[in-house]
Amino acid sequence: MRLFGSSHSQNTWSNHLLLKVANIVGAIFVMGGNVYAVISPLDVYYTGKETYFTPASWSFFIWPLIHMLLLGTCVYQFSGRGKEVILERIGWRLPLLDFLNAMYIYSWTMQEYRYALVFIIFAVSVVTQIYQEVKATALRNFCDEIFLHLPFSLYHGWTVGLIFLSAFEAFGVDALTEPADAWTKAFVFASFVLLEMVDFAYAYSAVEGDLPGCLAISWYFFAVVVRQTPERSAFVHWSALGFAIFSLCWVMRCVIGLELKFRGRNNRLGIGEETSRLLGGH
């Protein structure tokens, strides 16, 4: 019985061993790629193509936060709950996402913007599938929120913005040498509208909405406001500011939804009634 128990424990640990290693290696590799992009002598955050949709350089530092959370996801995969969601439901899509993200970073660093657009589109399609798997899980405990919902919501919201940025980098004009013509302004405004619609979808995706996704898009909007000054294009600047302020409405909607959900959960647990009794209520 002791030998059987030892063998069973070893088999449980070694289940999906290759996938576990791939998740860890992929997370470390992509984080290393982002670090290299920051410290590289190419200085890609400041020397890349300037478009009328480019956000402030500091906005890209959301990547370290996402990748730090994904390292926590890699640790969480060794738990029973993590095994169920990360290994059995998400599966090999997480290493695939790491590969696509790494190729996007490489292409973007080399200023091969059309390749970067292709890779970020595929990356968003994969992270959308992962995001849907996470949202579909019935149980949502604290670890699920920190190591599953939070990183993939931020990831999804941020990379949706990068699709539009990559499209402008691939096909748009250079904002340093060419003024924004009517077509550029129209495409920028249409992109703002589509990004705001995604923000709206996050806010109403559940009773409590999706606060991290809304925050990622608001973060992008305000970064565009800072980068696209009125001197460069007054239309782009004030349009971005209007959409950025409007995006805060969806953030507030999520905050209110979370508060209502928490209050409803407390009521179901009888916390409200017990508190009322302690305070002298009837």
Image (cartoon, rainbow, N blue to C red):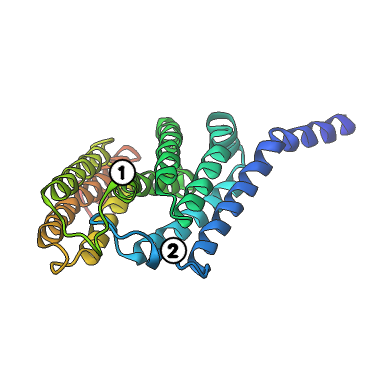
Name the side, left or right, on which 3 lies relative to 240: right
x and y percent of residue 277 in the render? 27, 50
Q: In which quarter of the image is the N terminus?
A: top right
- Tag 2's secondary structure? helix
Residue bearing the label numbered 1: 210
x and y percent of residue 274 in the render? 31, 47
Name the side, left or right, on which 81 lies relative to 186: right
Residue at point 43%, 32% (across, down): 129
Q: How crowded is mark 1: few (under 14 residues within 10 Å), some or many (20 or more)?
A: many
Residue 232 vs residue 174, the one in the foreground: 174
* Image quadrant assignment for residue 65: bottom left
x and y percent of residue 240 in the render? 16, 56
Residue at point 65%, 48% (across, down): 25
Q: Which of marks 2 and 1 is nearer the N terminus?
A: 2
x and y percent of residue 228 in the render? 21, 63
The answer, for residue 177, to whether it is visible in the render is yes
Residue at point 32%, 37% (across, down): 268
Residue bearing the label numbered 2: 44
Q: Mark 1 belongs to which amino acid?
A: Asp
* Image quadrant assignment for residue 134: top left
Q: Marks 2 and 1: which is nearer the front?
A: 2
